[in-house]
Amino acid sequence: MRVRLVNLYAGLILFGVSIALPLKAGLGLAPWDVLHQGLAERSGLPIGLVVNVVGALVLALWIPLRERPGLGTISNVLVVGPSAQLALMLLPEPGDLAVRVALLTSGVVLNSIATGLYIGASLGPGPRDGLMTGLARRGVSIRLARTSIEVSVLAAGWLLGGTVGVGTVLYAAAIGPLAQFFIPLFTVEHVRDHAGEAAKTQVGVR
């Protein structure tokens, strides 16, 4: 259990850092982060707080779906946002384009490593994961649920002023294969089968 807890919290902290890196790069964000950025700009709230609030609101949508949160679910809501905010405060402003590209690509890779760590711990999905799988249990296909959710949040975030760009495309193309590699790598042995199944449905969604 100790290893699973270490993996969970290391993964959630790194997930927050992986949000901050593309934000600093300014070359486009993952769909949920486009929404977070747009809401932060419109509300004037720190983006880390917005990440927390959105996570809590999405978690509330579990109630009619009768999904049950785990330790990892609650921890996701509480840890990712502050980790992203702290990383944004500590990271310097990038200079030339090469540095921005390095920040972007590092963020995508780190995101997949973090995904492997916290999903591999198998202590409960993130609130956005659970929304997707909850819809799937109500008869909506995983593909349709994931696509509908991500397209909706991307469109809403873009309308609110979030950054859509090459980073958005890179994330969409790379996160699935990378997470598929890292989830089995970081899965604690006695929960490997369960997490392997989770990897099929949860990559790229938080």
Image (tube, rainbow, N blue to C red):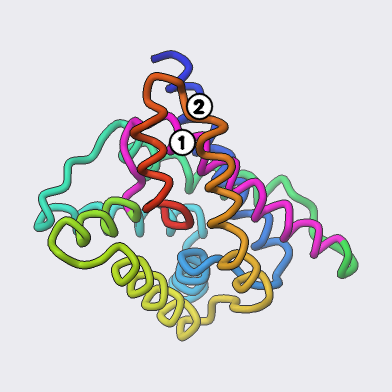
Task: Tell me the element at label 1.
Answer: helix
**Amino acid marked by disc 1:** Tyr
Q: Name the chief secondary structure element in magenta.
A: helix
In the rendered view, would you say 20 is above or below 151? Answer: above
Q: Tags 1 and 2 in contact by the CB under 8 Å rule?
A: yes
Name the residue beneath numbered marker 1: 118
Name the residue beneath numbered marker 2: 7
Mark 1 surroundings: few (<14), some (14-19) or many (≥20) residues within 10 A: many
Magenta includes 117? yes
Residue 35 relative to residue 171: left or right? left
Q: Going by the picture, which residue comes out furthest to the top?
A: 2
Residue 55 relative to residue 107: left or right? left
Task: Tell me the element at label 2.
Answer: helix
Q: Position of residue 13 (x, y in %)?
A: 54, 37
Magenta includes 29? no
Residue 164: quarter of image: bottom right
Q: Position of residue 158 (x, y in %)?
A: 50, 82
Image quadrant in which the N terminus is located: top left
**Amino acid marked by disc 2:** Asn
Q: Residue at x 48, y 44 (%)?
A: 80
User: Which contiguous range is marked in magenta?
Assistant: 99-127
